[in-house]
Amino acid sequence: MSVPAEQNTPVIKEILFGRANQKIFRDGLWDNNPITYQVMGICSALAVTTNVSTALVMSLGLIFVQGFSEAIISALRNHIPPRIRIIVQMAVVSTFVITLDLVLKAYFYPIWKQLTVFIGLIITNTLVVARLEGFAMHNPPWKSFLDGTGNAMGYGLALIVVSSLREILGSGTLLGFHVIPGSFYEQGYSNNGLMLLSPGAFFVLGLLIWGHRTIAKYVEGK
Amino acid sequence: MKFVEKIMQKFGAPFQKNGPLEKLYPLYEAIDTFVLTPGKVTRKAPHVRDSVDLKRMMVFVIIALVPATVMGIYNTGYQMLLAQQAAPDLMACLRLGAGKVLPIIAVSYAVGGFWEVLFAVVRKHEINEGLLVTGLLFPLVLPPTIPLWMVAVGISFGVVMGKELFGGTGYNVFNPALLARACLFFAYPSQMSGAKVWVAVDGYTRATPLGVVSQAAHGVDPVQALAGAGYTFQDLFWGLRPGSIGETSTFACILGLVFLLITRVANWKIVLSCVAGTFTMATIFSLFNGPNQPAYFALPVYWHYVLGGFAFGAVFMATDPVSAPATRLGHWIYGFMIGAITVIVRVANPAYPEGMMLAILFMNVFASSIDYTVMMSHIGSRNKRNRALSSVK
């Protein structure tokens, strides 16, 4: 077992929401956004973004799962034998996913019916495993928790932007309310069916990545 | 010419460096090089002297599109008058058709041009001439009833997602005009397909020849079905049938093809292999024809050439030099596959009566892989030969 680096350094009391911790949290939201920068979890981003409500639930679910599983794995990180670490990670993630699934089933049955397939697939979401491997295995629990929630929120943010565009353009509604006035339809406006198909999600996602990288001045391979 | 030069100089002053309109320089540059031959010389060898540059080439394509455009305008009017059971007088047809078609072309050029200029200004490159062709090709593959705002959406998608996203003219993977049509086709299927959209008269329904054949009952002779719906081979060849604006007349497409071949803009190998691919695939399907098969199976091969967008696609879309392969063998493979896939989509897929657009876009994706494979096999065979030669020594 490798000795984690921070054990050798003298312990400095860190402020709970200090600058370093804020940065960890902020990274996932913008600079290192899972969708537009790391391009992870795209499959679920395509599947759940035909309307905002499913995207919202999915994002909240992921924030919950990601934050807590990173914290737990991080707390256990010195006791997990490296060879079976993926199995341990999966066990922890699955526990939270199943909890989430049961809670939704109990209290939000209609949404659960739509989302249960995708909730189950959170376990295989590349984002979850990547952050567990890349961050939680090397950092203390509180930081890992911040990293987890930050990344999941960044993921959720991208999901909500994509799903809003897709729902408004594809169905003319937002969260189920009609936002495009009926007079538009009388003038010959019609909904964009492409937005409801998976390729539509790819187009919107591609534009989002383009926009984000233009603003952040990020060029791949540099 | 001195006169034009003077005007351009006077007019161009504010666009030069440090001028008030410096940012809009690409706009000036485009007009300047359009009316005058640029005086710039390449700094390093090779110094090829050739009057055919990108601008000239695009203008040739525009000229080649003139017959299809005029025929499209005439036919649009003709179909309207036919639907209203009025006498299809030549002038009336052109007037009515122009009223429908010209706004579509204008919107296509205006919106496409807006994006083109915007990207040229932001990215500080020249305005590409590709838009001249894209802006005319796109309206010609639309139904005449298309709402103008959809034209704007389509051309925006084609120019931005199909071209600028990849880096502008010369870098695009897909034919932008066709990608724009595909966008509208999937986004607004009820305005882009069906029996209602092809004649610009409200509420008038007439199935296109493609629709007639694909909806004919199993075992029915498709030629009889077409005749029953009032379509003869002559009508289809000359272009007097409902359909997308520019695609109806095979004859006009052949005229354009002749011009493109004389000026060597289009590649004859692609067109010929396209025809061959359709012939082969349609023949194979007709071998499997039986009483339980869809009527499409029994369609004689030569009908495939005058139906739908085959002629227009093979002449103007498949030969687009940017999205087609660049190797000689690649041209043959590419064209053949377009022809074959078109027939497969038409005959075997009941959801889409026409397959030309999908076939070309599909093969666009493979163009670079075809080139790569062809070159690799060339390199391999030459290496083999060299090794054989050196071992003889």
Image (cartoon, coloured by chain):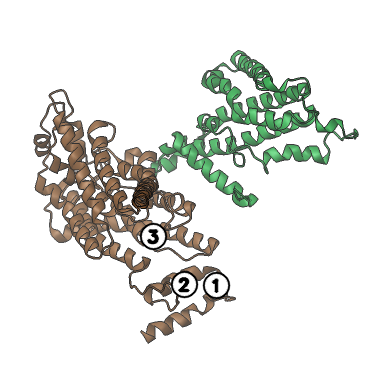
Please, which chain is the residue tagged with disc 1 on?
B
Where, quadrant-wise, is the N terminus of chain B in this rendering?
bottom left
Q: Are marks 2 and 1 on the same chain?
A: yes
Residue for badge 1: B21
Residue B159 image position (x, y, % from top left): 43, 53
**In the image, residue A129 lies at what x, y percent?**
64, 27
Q: CA distance from mark 2 to mark 1?
A: 10 Å
Q: Is residue A26 left or right of residue B129?
A: right
Instruction: Determine the residue positioned at 9% across, 44% down.
Output: B232
Q: Earlier in the sequence, mark 2 or mark 1?
A: 1
Residue type marked 2: Tyr
Q: Position of residue B261 (x, y in %)?
A: 23, 61
According to the colouring, which chain is brown?
A: B
Determine whether A137 is above or below B179 in the image. above
Residue B41 % position (x, y): 45, 76
Q: Are marks 2 and 1 in contact (CB under 8 Å)?
A: yes
Q: Quadrant of residue B202?
A: top left
Q: Earlier in the sequence, mark 2 or mark 3?
A: 2
Q: Quick check: can you spot residue B207?
A: no
For the residue pair B280 and B245, the one nearer the viewer reads as B280
**Please, is residue B149 above or below residue B12 in the view?**
above
Query: Which residue is label 2 attached to?
Result: B28
Distance between the Cα atoms at labels 2 and 3?
16 Å
The residue carrying mark 3 is B131
Q: Quadrant of residue A55?
A: top right
Q: Amino acid at mark 3?
A: Leu
Assign a secondary structure to mark 1.
Answer: loop
Chain A is shown in which shade? green
Residue A70 visible from this viewpoint = yes
